[in-house]
Image: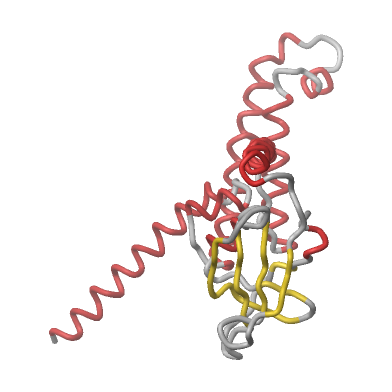
Amino acid sequence: MTDLWKHFSAEVKSSGRRSLGFLAAIPATALPRRYRLRYTDASDSDLLSAALASGFIQLAVFGIAYILLFLSRLGSYRVFPLLEYAVDIRSIPIGYLAVEGAARFLSAHGSHEVLPSLPFVVIERIGSYFDRRREALRVGPRVPDRVTRGDGKACDWCVECWAAKLDWDRNKYLMISFRGTYYEVVGRETREPPRPHTYLLKEPPSWKLVVKPEIYDPDESG
């Protein structure tokens, strides 16, 4: 009886953690991947479910707000109320966010992609620009990655990088596609500039599941 109670308690706790993780993933799916990984480690299937919920909530909230705002201003439009409202600078942001919510919902449902919200993407791009500027001052001008063979035991490839690869650092389940083969990050080293960040890649065991790997091309890293 004691073992049964322990098993039941463990299941309840596990279910509670999954529920909390799913709820946390709903707003996180609006963020670019770089920031999203800071707030959730949900699986791909949970992220897609959270993205569906996030897109639907965004569509519903801003869609209703768009309609209510139109009704409240209906008397101020004289000739073509719908057209005048659609191009009104005060209503455009709300209308855009409603349309974006629909696009995010359809992206998660149709193409199984988590589409972030454009305002957060703009913030991320600005942040990335200043990060690169700081990194350039610290280690010198940006240079392409250098990929060398490993010893075949500890690692298969060594990837030396000018800047840290945030996805590689934060996503412990990430698989990397390089030259038609899948690899996982098995270690990290710090070396001298201009490539202070070194990642050790190794082919994973055959039993490991590969889902949506990141395609890596060192020629596009500069």
User: Which residue is situated farthest in the bottom direction here?
Assistant: 206
Q: In this view, does 22 lie to the left or right of 101?
A: left
Q: Which of 24 and 123 is in front in this view?
A: 123
In the displayed structure image, the side of residue 64 where residue 18 appears, left or right: left
Q: Residue at x 77, y 20 (%)?
A: 85
90 to the left or right of 207 = right
Residue extending furthest right? 79
Nearer the observer, 72 or 124 = 124
- Residue at 68% x, 51% y is 115
- Residue 76 image position (x, y, % from top left): 73, 9
Q: Which of 80 and 55 is in front in this view?
A: 55
Indicate whether 43 appears above or below 31: below
- Quarter of the figure with residue 216: bottom right
Q: Give whichever of 71, 57 is nearer the camera.
A: 57
Q: How many labels does the image show?
A: 0
How far across and down, in percent of the image, does residue 107 sit? 72, 56
Task: State the image quarter where residue 114 is shown.
Answer: bottom right
Q: Can residue 188 be seen in this view?
A: yes
Q: Which residue is drawn at 60% across and 73% down?
A: 200
Which percent across, then down, holds residue 28?
Answer: 53, 49
For residue 222, which quarter of the picture? bottom right
Question: Where residue 98 sits: x, y (%)?
Answer: 68, 37
Q: In this view, does 30 lie above or below 180?
A: above
Q: Which colour scheme is used?
A: secondary structure
Q: Name the quarter where the N terminus is drawn.
A: bottom left
Is residue 119 something one can see in this rendering? no
